[in-house]
Amino acid sequence: MALLSRFSAFEQLGLLFLRVGSGLFLAFLHGKGKMIALWNHLFRAEEWGFPDTVASLGFPLPLFFAGVVAVVEFVGGLMFAAGLYTRYVAALITINMSVAVYRHLITDMRYELASLFLLIALYILFRGAGRYSCDRFFKTDTV
């Protein structure tokens, strides 16, 4: 039985590394740039091309949805890494990445990274944040 508990501990550690690594990558390699661009667009009147991309996909209110994407990728990525309200955040990341994969597929762009984020978010959505998370500490995993 001790061997099985060791595997469980390794599984929980692996889940922690997966969640933290992917959340930080999403936040800092994708969301941070969008958040800075959103901030500069709203408060410094700088141009931001991402809402045009969102509009080209047929979304109404492209600035609003571009802002939602920026917040989900940055703030959601940080919350995902911390394991805070993880299943809710994973659901938002899943939706976000589904649209990203679709966009990349219709424009012949590389879709592998968006697909990986989508699959990781789906896994965490169904699995939960795990033992080493803020959800476990604060008992916020209610889904």
Image (cartoon, grey):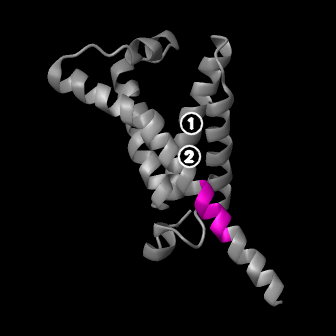
Residue sitting at the far left = 44
> Which label number is shown at residue 129?
none
The amino acid pointed to by label 2 is Ala
Q: Residue at x 16, y 22 (%)?
A: 44
x 61%, y 32%: residue? 114
Could you tell me residue 62's position as x and y percent? Answer: 39, 18
Q: Residue at x 34, y 21 (%)?
A: 63
Name the amino acid type tagged 1.
Ile
Image quadrant holding the C terminus, namely: bottom right
Frontmost residue, 59 versus 111: 111
Q: Nearer the viewer, residue 25 or 115?
A: 25
- Kindly identify which residue carries mark 1: 95
Q: Give residue 76's position: percent from left, percent from top.
A: 44, 46
- Within the image, what quadrant is residue 35 found in? top left
Based on the picture, tell me whether residue 24 belongs to the magenta stretch.
no
- Residue 136, above or below 16: below
Q: Determine the residue located farthest toward the bottom in the rendered image.
A: 1
The correct choice, above or below, for 33 with respect to 51 in the image is below
Q: Nearer the viewer, residue 7 or 118?
A: 7
Q: Position of residue 122 (x, y in %)?
A: 66, 47
Residue carrying label 2: 91
Q: Main secondary structure of the magenta part?
A: helix
